[in-house]
Each structure stands twice: as C-alpha cells, then as structure tokens.
Amino acid sequence: QVQLVESGGGLVQPGGSLRLSCTASGFTFRSFPVIWYRQAPGNERESVAAITHTGVVMEYLDSVKGRFTISRDNDKNTAYLQMNSLKPEDTAVYYCNARSLFDDYWGQGTQVIVSS
C-alpha cells in the first residue's frame, strides 16, 4: 500500500521554527522527486520547494527563500522541510508530493499555524 505521511506541523509563534517530515512506504521513494506544497484557506495550492530523487534542490518559492530548506534521506524514505523565521503568511496545510512520469503520490497534509 502506497503511503506518504506528513508530520511535524503545529502552532508556532512568528519567528519560530518547525520541521516537517514526509515518510513514504509502498513504493521506491528514492526514485521520485519530492515537492512540498501548501494551501492556505481561500488560496490555490502552491509549490514551496522541490528536490530531485538524488537530493539536489530544484527550487524554492520566492517568499520562503532563505528561510525554508528542503532535504531528504533516502535510507529513511523521508523528505523534510525545515522552516525557520516563520511568518503568519506561512499558515497553511502543507503537503508532500512524490511524482514521476507514471505515478503521482500525495500525503494527507499537515497543518501549520503561525500566530502569536
């Protein structure tokens, strides 16, 4: 059974940090690029950061550059999104996506709320 499970979300004050994890099972995770997306209420889903299957960072959303870091550990079948200097506008549900030419897997999302 294919699964992507996000974790690590929660409530954090502005300026704080969170590390999101995305753990995969049921498919060859190390062969898939991973993209972190987020969706805030009333907004469209947007891509936040992307990483190749070998761990090369492909891109960051402009508004998170310098604050967020995407990484992965293929031995643990897990991708990460380290989020520092969080702002209220980072509040959203964060999703991880593992995608190839033939397959497209999504997690259920993890809620991040940045508020004082």
Image (cartoon, rainbow, N blue to C red):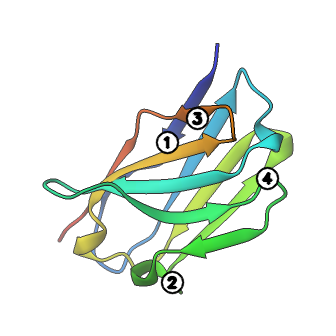
Q: CA distance from mark 4 to mark 3?
A: 14 Å
Cα separation, mark 2 vs mark 4, equals 21 Å
Mark 3 element type? strand
Q: Is residue 6 left or right of residue 114?
A: right
What residue is shown at x 70% (from left), y 44% (from top)? 78
Circle on res. 104: 3
Amino acid type at circle 4 is: His
Closer to the observer: label 2 or label 3?
Answer: 3
- Report x, y in % for residue 33: 70, 51
Query: Which residue is tagged 4?
Result: 53
**4 vs 3, front mark:** 3
**Vertical placement of 78 versus 116: above or below?**
above
Mark nearer the viewer, 1 or 2: 2
Res 29 label: none
Kindly identify which residue carries mark 1. 7
Of the image marks 4 and 3, the number of the one nearer the N terminus: 4
Instruction: Classify 10 Å Cα crowding around label 3: few (below 14), some (14-19), many (20 and above).
Output: few
Judge whether 98 appears above or below 42 on screen: above
Camera-side residue: 36 or 103?
103
Q: Mark 1 falls on what kind of element?
A: strand
Q: Closer to us: mark 2 or mark 4?
A: 4
In the rendered view of the protein, which quadrant contains the N terminus?
Answer: top right
Tag 3 or tag 2, which sits nearer the N-term?
A: 2
